[in-house]
Image (cartoon, rainbow, N blue to C red):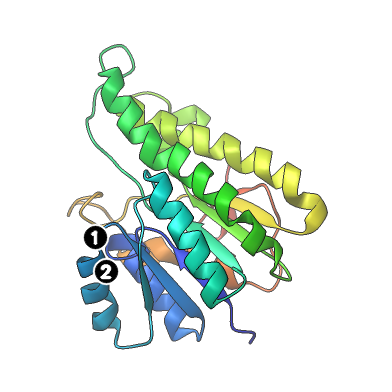
Amino acid sequence: MEQKIILVTGGNRGIGFEICKQLFEMGHKVIMGSRDLAKGKKAAESIKGDIHVRHLDVTKEADIKNLAMDLRDHFGKLDVLINNAGLLIGNKGATEVNIDEVKRIMEANFYGPWRLTQVLLPLLKNSEEGRIINMSSGMGAWDSLSGGYAGYRLSKTSLNALTVQMANELSGIGIKVNAMSPGWVRTDMGGKEAPLSVEEGADTATWLATAEVIPTGKFFRDRREIDW
């Protein structure tokens, strides 16, 4: 197996942490992006391995640029970008939600991953087959746009659209871009009542990052393609 250099944003807890753990155990070089560097280092220590921890708030342009320079200087390339970091606040529908709240969600869940991907694209181009994996949600699928949580849902719908756009634009240079839904997972965000473990929630991202052959421009859950 060829060792890949993989960046996981929001990697210090929840699904992101489990993705880092699974990828490290498979022998890959894992870079854990964490908004709180101390928490990231503590999380990495619990894996008991050589996890590279970097400070990263995807809503901060300076953080993104600093990370890009650091990755360029230390690794020279990036094989896989997993846009996992995200924000879920509020539960109101589109007719009642505070737009400023929606802006916060969009900055973390949509504009942040978009900006990060743009800045890291030169490093992904240095890979033999760069991959971009966007952590989306079934709540953003077209047939799920109801029932509150409008800001979160629409941020994921937007991320799905960006996935398709980028997949089409990058198909000519071999960079694969896909989105995935982890399902309802028992994390701080998902809550204790969720039916899936973090191991199950992380599995599809790990698979998309490491499988020998994958398509591009698709939406996955449980390693299977699902409707947008």
Image coordinates of residue 196 in percent, x first then y, are: 32, 59
- Determine the secondary structure under disc 2: helix
Q: Looking at the rendering, in which quadrant would you find the C terminus?
A: top right
Q: Is residue 139 found left or right of 221 in the rendered image?
A: left
Disc 2 residue type?
Gly
- Would you place residue 41 above or below residue 88 in this image? below
The mark found on residue 116 in the picture is none
Q: Residue 161: name its quadrant.
A: top right
Image quadrant assignment for residue 153:
top left
Residue that lies at the very extreme toward the right in this rendered image: 172
Local SS, label 1: loop
**Mark 2 Cα within 10 Å, few/some/many (few <14, many 20+)?**
many
The label number, if any, that marks residue 36 in the structure image: 1
The amino acid sitting under disc 1 is Asp
| x 64%, y 84%: residue | 2
Res. 75 visible in picture: yes
Report x, y in % for residue 174. 77, 59
Question: From where the camera sits, is residue 222 visible?
Answer: no
The residue located at (48%, 68%) in the rendering is: 70
Res 55 quadrant in image: bottom left
Looking at the picture, does residue 225 appear above or below residue 174? above
Quarter the N terminus occupies: bottom right
Q: Are marks 1 and 2 in contact (CB under 8 Å)?
A: yes
- Left or right: residue 145 versus residue 130 is left
Residue at label 2?
40
Q: Residues within 10 Å of mark 1 (few under 14, many from 20)?
A: some
156, 77: nearer the viewer:
77
Q: Is 101 left or right of 133, judged from the image as shown?
A: left
Q: Is residue 65 left or right of residue 228?
A: left
